[in-house]
Image (cartoon, rainbow, N blue to C red):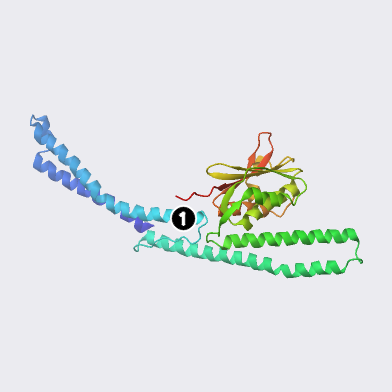
Amino acid sequence: MLRLYLRFYLTLVASLVLFVIATATLWRFTGGPMEHMSGQGHPGRNFHVALMLLALSIGIAAFPVVRNMSRKLERLQRGVDSLGAGDFTTRVAVEGHDEVARLARSFNSAAGRIEQLVKAHKALLANASHELRTPLARIRLAVELMKNSVDPKRKSGLEEDIAELDWLVDEILLASRLDAVTEAIVTQEVDLLALAAEECARYDDAHLEGAPGVVQGDARLLRRLLRNLLENAARHGSPPTQVRIARDSTATTITVWDSGAGVPAAEFENVFRPFYRPQDGGTGLGLSLVRQIARRHGGEARCAQMDDGRSSFVVTLPAPQLPT
């Protein structure tokens, strides 16, 4: 950054030298401010006015030089902010051959490597999850063939383990697809109340209330969002599970809670982290997918505290825009 420092320094020095030379010239031709003290007020005033105009002129002349350098730094900062927000395709323009240009090239190179690493990680995760399907199918078939040769309790435990592995693989595959596909999802009008009624029917202790709430979205993904919320309540909460659909002019809100103690306030954000495992276990992907799906639809998922101190999961999805 030495060259950049020298540019700023030399610009400042040149401005000061020019100011001193011009001031001395004005002093010589106007007689300096002492003329004002000797009773000839006008030349003194002219000197001060000329001095102010000179300082203003130098400031205006130096502004484009300094602004050009600061503008490059601002563009680089926006690129860093965009990369930090998760846009790994971010690149910044490389202008000139100074230190800022070298820094921009280094940033683009680092961003490219990060993008390649993230893509490789996502591909590895998706491929590994897909490959797990085959051994899981073989294990399930072997368990079915063991029917009478294995203790029923042990067989039931194996079937539960297989079901959990199958669910985990499915969650990983869906998370990988959501990460890998950046294009807008194919949307259609979906009635969340009807969708929630179908999902609540799969559970004995799930109760639904509310009004029809139509949103624009992918019905398959929204069904998965609701199912993950209900499954989370069934596994980690206490029955019954309550589901409420509410809507206003701007959004439709899904609220899910159960009769358990809920999530501690300190864990409100942690439960949405991928593979975060709270004390009561879990795969750590269900709620992460809920947030991913909500955000893909332009909404948000969060954990909120209710009036009685328990917690609930709240998903807000934007209402469809009316045609103009």
- Circle 1 packing at 10 Å, graded few (<14), some (14-19), many (20+), is some
Q: Residue at x 23, y 50 (%)?
A: 61
Q: Residue at x 76, y 50 (%)?
A: 203
Q: Position of residue 213 (x, y in %)?
A: 60, 46
- Which quadrant of the figure contains the N terminus? bottom left
Q: Position of residue 18 (x, y in %)?
A: 20, 49
Q: Is residue 213 left or right of residue 142?
A: left
- Does 19 sit above or below residue 141? above
Q: Position of residue 164 (x, y in %)?
A: 76, 58
Q: Is residue 202 left or right of residue 105?
A: right
Provide the residue designation for mark 1: 80
Which residue is nearer to you in this view: 253 or 24? 253
Q: Position of residue 259 (x, y in %)?
A: 74, 40
Amino acid on which the number 1 mark rests in the picture:
Val
Toward which corner of the image does residue 146 lie, by quadrant? Answer: bottom right
- Does 158 sit above or below residue 302? below
Q: Residue at x 10, y 31 (%)?
A: 41
Please give the count of numbered marks on the rendered protein.
1
Toward which corner of the image does residue 221 lie, by quadrant? Answer: bottom right
